[in-house]
Image (cartoon, rainbow, N blue to C red):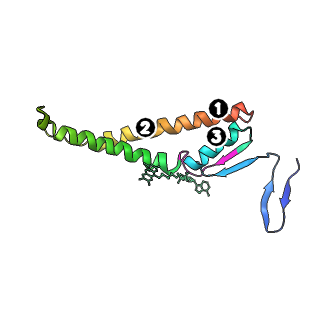
Amino acid sequence: MPAQRFGARNSEVVCTAEQFDLVIIGGGPGGYGAALYGASAGMNVALVERDALGGTCLNRGCIPAKAFLETAAVNRHVAHAADFGINTSSPSVDFAVTQARKRKIVDGLVKGIETHYVGAAEKNGAG
Ligand SMILES: Cc1cc2nc3c(=O)[nH]c(=O)nc-3n(C[C@H](O)[C@H](O)[C@H](O)COP(=O)(O)OP(=O)(O)OC[C@H]3O[C@@H](n4cnc5c(N)ncnc54)[C@H](O)[C@@H]3O)c2cc1C
C-alpha cells in the first residue's frame, strides 16, 4: 500500500506498507496483556516499548520487591533461628548475591513474556 498522510495536524504520521489493527505503546503488564488479548483475537498487533519489556512491575516494581522481601524474610528466620532451638551464627546479607538472584528471576519472567509474545506473533504469521 502506498504511504498515506493523515491530514495536516498529524503530518508526521505516515501510514507505511505495514498495517496494524492495534498499536500499543508500553510493554508493561497493561501493554503486554492487551497485546496478547489482541493477538489471540486474531488482530495484527504492534507493541512499542522504549525500555524493557515487562515495564515497571517486572523490572523495577512488584517482582524485584518480592525477591528482596523474600531475602529479608530468610534473614529474619535465620536471625531468630535460636528461638526455634536451631543454633546458627548471625546472618549477614551479601547484596551482590541478592541482586543476582533478583536479576535471574526478572530475566526469566521477561524471557517468558518475550517467548509467549513472539509465539503469538508467529501463530498469526507476523514472526
Ligand atoms: C516498588 C513497586 C512495587 C509494586 N508492587 C506491586 C504489586 O505487588 N502488585 C501490583 O499489582 N502492583 C505493584 N506495583 C505496581 C505495578 O508495577 C504497576 O501497577 C504496573 O507496572 C502498571 O503496569 P502498566 O503496564 O500500566 O505500566 P508500566 O509497568 O509502568 O509500563 C509502562 C511501559 O511503557 C513504556 N513506555 C512509556 N512511555 C513510552 C513511550 N512513549 N514509548 C514506548 N514505551 C513507553 C515504559 O518504558 C514501560 O515499560 C508496584 C510498583 C512499584 C514501583
**Disc 3 C-beta below 8 A from ligand 1:** no
Q: What residue type is labelled 1?
A: Gly
Q: Which of 102 and 39 is in front in this view?
A: 39
Q: Is 47 covered by the magenta stretch?
A: yes
Q: What element carries label 2?
A: helix
Q: Residues within 10 Å of mark 1 (few under 14, many from 20)?
A: some
> N-terminal of the two: label 1 or label 2?
2
Residue 59 relative to residue 15: left or right? left
Image height of 93 relative to 12, above or below = above
Residue 107 image offset from top left, x and y in percent: 47, 38
Q: Nearer the viewer, residue 102 or 70?
A: 70
Which residue position holds label 1? 119
Residue 83 image offset from top left, x and y in percent: 12, 38
Which mark is nearer the camera, 3 or 2? 3
Instruction: Verify CB contact (< 8 Å) between mark 3 and mark 2.
Output: no
Q: What stretch is highlighted in magenta?
A: 46-54
Taking the spot 66% from the left edge, 34% from the top edge, the residue there is 120
Which residue position holds label 3? 36
Task: Determine which of the numbered discs, if any, sits on residue 105 in the image.
Answer: 2
> N-terminal of the two: label 3 or label 2?
3
Question: Quadrant location of residue 126?
Answer: top right
Q: Is 86 covered by the magenta stretch?
A: no
